[in-house]
Image: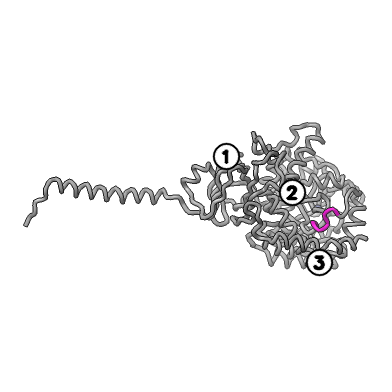
């Protein structure tokens, strides 16, 4: 039997079907446009990317998923595309890449302020070497690295390059704190706490490389101390070891005029030319300081793709001289910034390193254009990454790079007003202004609360070394 459907009902059925279809279609559209869930979104700050276009995004945002940055854009655009399982409100802050300290000796924070205002030879021979001879041990290195890690993550350093003894202890403490490290086991000619001979040190270095190779945070390295503290065969052996494993080589290079004199007397050559004659220079080598170099040396460093770490505060404090940073930049040598150890700085604040670098080269050249705020920021981020051969992974806020990100407060009297975020980062901001520190996507400090280290315990442990260190230099 055929039922006659009243025209009004027909219409209703049609419109119901139409409405149902619309609902389904809309659901499909909204599924397509639903924000993608990611692990973390920082939103609302001024984002200084240090990317190739040097984008500075007012009211910007960074989306992070797992270990990686997935997008950097305006807060609006990120809000439409991503929803963070965790969100950090960065309004009133600058968001920037984590800072990269290309040269330090982390455990030496325990010698902070032990001896100041001395000539380099007195400082080393009367204080630093005796203190090291009597106090350096795995326990000392562990306590010192924890203190250094705490200071670094509180002041916005996310990656550091280190040269010290018992480097496996430095690595373990660095990993536990969640920081990224390029960590070099020291090789030096005279007997030291962790090796009686350079051959012992090379064995240690190899074991260290094997246990940390392919670690997501730790890049093991070999650290032959300097050309004047090692003979030629040991320098070559150290370099061969790092080549064999494809890991970096960290060395002090042309730091003082004494080193130039030693190279002249022994080899009738500059330290740079001498190392090149050994086949030592090449990609993967990072030379710390590079103060005393000629134009020919700079050209050689560029040709061999050697990275340089500039340490303005240490060089000024020890009166080592002024590295020709504008010449390095002009020659396009990969040059980053470092603090050096806290015994010659006396802290690990990379904002200070940026400020001192910018001021030192203006002063030294009597040209305020010699090193701009922008260049100083690049040296503490992307140029530092390049000096360490890590520019594909870190050094800028770009999709597919590791999420090493910090935020600094610009809400206080000292930072008000703000016309230019990059100017503030170099000339106004201090390490204490850092609010959040993120490494490899993991939040290590949130609103100045350190999450990976027990702040009180670290400081108490460090203080327990004071008497032992004092006794060592009496
Ligand atoms: Zn050093």
Q: Earlier in the sequence, mark 3 or mark 1?
A: 1
Left or right of 2: which side holds 121? right
State the residue position of label 1.
57
Q: Quadrant of the N terminus?
A: bottom left
Whether residue 255 appears in magenta in the rendering, the answer is: no
Residue 374 visible, this angle:
no
Residue closest to the eye, 287 or 156: 156
Q: Earlier in the sequence, mark 3 or mark 2?
A: 3
> Is ligand 1 closer than 8 angstroms to the Cβ of mark 1?
no
**Label of residue 137 in the image:** 3
- Contact? badges 3 and 2 (CB < 8 Å): no
- Specify the segment rendered in magenta: 108-113
Residue 299 visible, this angle:
yes
Dot 1, crowdedness within 10 Å: few (<14), some or many (≥20)? some
Question: How far apart in space, not on screen, are marks 2 and 1 (Cα)?
Answer: 25 Å
State the residue position of label 2.
349
- Display colour scheme: one colour
Q: Earlier in the sequence, mark 2 or mark 1?
A: 1
Q: Residue at x 81, y 34 (%)?
A: 365
Left or right of 144: which side holds 55? left
Q: Residue at x 11, y 50 (%)?
A: 5
Question: Percent x, y for residue 180?
Answer: 67, 56
> Is ligand 1 closer than 8 angstroms to the Cβ of mark 2?
no
């Amino acid at each position: 039997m055929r039922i006659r459907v009243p025209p009004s009902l027909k219409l209703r059925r049609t419109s119901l079907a139409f409405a149902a279809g619309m609902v389904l279609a809309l659901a499909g559209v909204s599924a397509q446009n639903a924000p993608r869930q990611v692990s973390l979104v920082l939103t609302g700050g001024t984002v200084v990317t240090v990317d190739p276009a040097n984008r500075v995004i007012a009211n910007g945002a960074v989306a992070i998923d797992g270990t990686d940055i997935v997008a950097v854009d305006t807060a609006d655009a990120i809000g439409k595309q991503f929803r963070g399982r965790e969100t950090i409100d960065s309004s009133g802050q600058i968001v920037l890449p984590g800072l990269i300290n290309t040269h330090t000796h982390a455990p030496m924070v325990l010698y902070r302020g032990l001896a100041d205002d001395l000539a380099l030879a007195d400082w080393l021979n009367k204080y630093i070497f005796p203190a090291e001879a009597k106090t350096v041990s795995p326990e000392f290195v562990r306590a010192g690295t924890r203190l250094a890690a705490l200071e670094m993550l509180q002041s916005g350093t996310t990656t550091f390059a280190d040269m010290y003894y018992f480097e496996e202890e430095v690595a373990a403490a660095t990993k536990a704190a969640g920081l990224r490290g390029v960590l070099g086991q020291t090789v030096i000619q005279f007997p030291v706490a962790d090796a009686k001979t350079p051959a012992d040190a090379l064995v240690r270095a190899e074991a260290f490389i094997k246990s940390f190779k392919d670690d997501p945070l730790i890049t093991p390295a070999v650290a032959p101390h300097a050309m004047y503290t090692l003979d030629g065969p040991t320098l070559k052996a150290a370099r061969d070891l790092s080549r064999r494993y494809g890991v970096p080589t960290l060395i002090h290079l042309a730091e003082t005029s004494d080193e130039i004199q030693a190279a002249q007397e022994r080899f009738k050559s500059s330290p740079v030319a001498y190392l090149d004659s050994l086949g030592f220079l090449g990609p993967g080598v990072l030379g710390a300081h590079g103060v005393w170099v000629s134009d020919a040396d700079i050209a050689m460093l560029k040709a061999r793709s050697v990275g340089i770490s500039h340490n303005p505060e240490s060089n000024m404090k020890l009166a080592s001289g002024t590295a020709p940073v504008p010449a390095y930049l002009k020659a396009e040598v990969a040059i980053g910034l470092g603090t050096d150890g806290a015994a010659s700085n006396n802290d690990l604040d990379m904002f200070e390193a940026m400020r001192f670098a910018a001021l030192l080269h203006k002063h030294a050249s009597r040209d305020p254009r010699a090193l701009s705020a922008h260049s100083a920021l690049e040296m503490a981020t992307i140029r530092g990454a390049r000096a360490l051969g890590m520019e594909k992974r870190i050094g800028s806020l770009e999709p597919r790079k590791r999420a090493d990100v910090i935020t600094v407060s610009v809400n206080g009297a000292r930072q008000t007003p703000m016309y230019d975020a990059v100017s503030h980062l170099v000339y106004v901001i201090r390490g204490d202004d850092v609010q959040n520190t993120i490494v490899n996507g993991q939040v290590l400090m949130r609103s100045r609360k350190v999450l990976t280290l027990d702040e009180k315990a670290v400081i108490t442990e460090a203080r327990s070394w004071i008497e032992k260190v004092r006794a060592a230099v009496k």
